Image (cartoon, grey):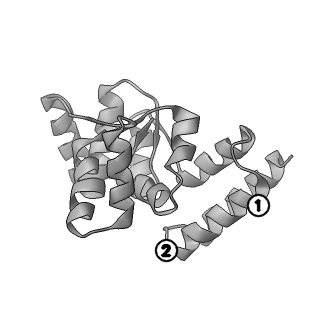
Amino acid sequence: MIIDSSSLIIFAKLNKISILLNLFKKIEIADEVYRETILDGLERKFDDSLILKGHFDKGQIEVIALAKKHLELAQKIQDISSIGPGEAQTIALAKQLEKKELIIDELLAREAAKSLGLNPIGSLRVLLLAYEKELLNEKEVKEITDKMIKYKFRISALTLIRFWELFDKIKK
């Protein structure tokens, strides 16, 4: 599964990369996401970057370089959508690999992805998928969501309300 920086960082901060790996088997990221999540974070001595580096070293996170035409696409996406380079490269990587789904949380980036025929899912949707596949129980979903909020993960009140409504519909 292709994932952007902020989504990858929150799962690393929570030490829950295992959820992503259990659901999707492999994590694929663009060069810019590697720079933002691992290289920059290691320079700043962030714990989450050390966690991500460990998964990268084990081959569980794969960095995929964008071909020239997809680098150009990323730049166009960034210019038009006013999103960051990590999100733009994540979208371009999905196009390059001809994948429809990607994990991305930023609203403008999600809209940009949709405009290119992609189906972005957010980190909260990942928790719902993990619950449905019985990788997490209800208590764990609540604990992880609370920690996301504690870590100042960008979740609007409306998004949180929708999340819990969806959760109630699938609750076992």
> Which secondary structure lies at badge 2?
loop
In this rendering, is residue 72 above or below 111? above
Residue at (30% x, 34% y) in the render: 93
Q: Nearer the viewer, mark 2 or mark 1?
A: 1
Element at badge 1?
helix
Indicate whether 112 appears above or below 153.
above
Query: Percent position (x, y) of residue 95?
Result: 33, 30
Tell me the amino acid under the disc marked 2.
Lys
Which residue is at the far left?
Answer: 68
Residue highlighted by disc 2: 152
Horizontal arrangement in the rendering, residue 21 relative to residue 37 (left or right)? right
Q: Which mark is residue 139?
A: 1
Give how far across and how far down residue 75 sits, in percent. Answer: 18, 45
Against 23, is 149 above or below? below
Neighbourhood count class around disc 2 (C-alpha, 10 Å): few under 14, some 14–19, many 20 upward: few
* Amino acid type of the residue that numbered disc 1 sits on in the rendered structure: Lys
